[in-house]
Amino acid sequence: MKKILIFGPTEHQGGIESFIELVISQLKGKAEFTIIQFTENEIVHSDYIRKSKLANIVKLEFKTGIKGKLSFFNKKLMKNFLSKNHFDVLHINENSPASFWLAKIALHNKIKVIYEAHNSFATPIKFNYTPRFLLKWIRFNQKRKLNRLNIVPVAVSDLAAKSMFYKNKEVVFIWNSIDTDKFEFSEIDRETLRNQMNISLDSKVGMFAARFVSQKNIFRALHIAEESISRGVLDFFVFIGDGVLSKDFNGELSKLSEKISTKILYLGKKDNIGRWYSFADLFLMTSFYEGFPFTVVEAQASGLPTILSDSVTKQVKCTDLLTYYSLEKGNAEWVSTISKVFEIESNRYERINYSKVVHNSKFSIENFKASLIELYQLNTEKK
């Protein structure tokens, strides 16, 4: 059985974390997985991963910032670990080319390296007061070094591939998949949640669900929600998620008039997000950039009309439910687009039918599993 080492998951729930959980659950028994915990904090759902015997989790606490780089601490730690443990594959999941050094060490140890791009824009380096031109140079240099290595380049979308690899790289695309049964529209969930929140079934409700970080452009979403309610296009709007900007978001929410603020509800983090897609009538995504958003596929499986920024890859589209719109347009224009979506909603299929559409698309679990077996070159006949 092949031994696969995975790098990427953190203590925060996001696209990489969701992807890895899907990988190890779908390939349970077909490969032996080990996940690197590279911070002092436990990775998301670590207890579940251990109890379900989906993967081993090994703690290699990397140092961050200048100190870690100047001391070569992380490189020494990784070299020592790989010298004592055998792996066939290292699967690096990253939002930037910053882990090129990790790939280089693994290749030196004759380990196959899969480097997967999960975002269309390299996230900021955590150096205080680093000039923008210097950050740009650092990322350029990291990308150049990464693309010189004999890695298997993988990406979740065309935009993610462009940000990480050169054009001459033959990139493998692994389409993020979902269990459509978990996101199928439920009239029972819709009625139950609306009753709990004292919202009538005929009220028009918008929804935003994401990590509360700058990438997601949450304050723009808040002002679009504000104007939508002010103009009567929407009756309520809910925000779901948490993150470093949660406190700031609450501060902005408190500045709204009482008439509007009572219609905009911040619910925090919700585990069973599928129920909330059924609860809502419209999904909003105002992200500055994305690699490949799971939530958009999930929303489509629930038959939920979605308006998203045109900075998001078109490869996420598998139904007629998506409307792309430019962030350069004003809030009033976004609200007008929301109004138009409601006008044409009645001409679509019943919401419950969309789960089958997504299930039969490239985002099916079967396609995902087959792609991974090919990527890892697993022999399905041997265990």
Image (cartoon, grey):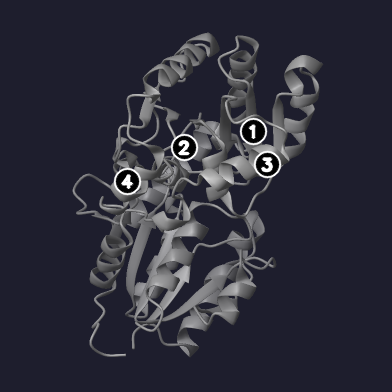
Label 3 and label 1: CA atoms lie apart by 34 Å
Q: Which residue is mark 4?
A: 157
Coordinates of residue 315 in the picture (x, y in percent): 29, 40
Q: Residues within 10 Å of mark 4 (few under 14, many from 20)?
A: many
Q: Is tag 1's residue or tag 2's residue first in the polypeptide sequence?
A: 2
In this view, the residue in front, 125 or 45, is 45
User: Is residue 149 visible in the rendered structure shown here?
Assistant: no
Q: Which mark is residue 82?
A: none
User: Is residue 258 visible in the rendered structure shown here?
Assistant: yes
Q: Is tag 1's residue or tag 4's residue first in the polypeptide sequence?
A: 4
Residue type at mark 4: give it: Ser
Write the residue at 54% across / 52% down. 14
Q: Secondary structure at mark 4?
A: loop
Q: Are marks 3 and 1 in contact (CB under 8 Å)?
A: no
Q: Which mark is residue 136?
A: 2
Query: Quadrant of the rendered structure where residue 280 is?
Result: top right
In this rendering, the answer to whether 381 lies above or below 41 is: below
Label 1 and label 4: CA atoms lie apart by 28 Å
Q: Is tag 2's residue or tag 4's residue first in the polypeptide sequence?
A: 2
Coordinates of residue 18 in the picture (x, y in percent): 49, 58
Write the residue at 40% across / 39% down. 351
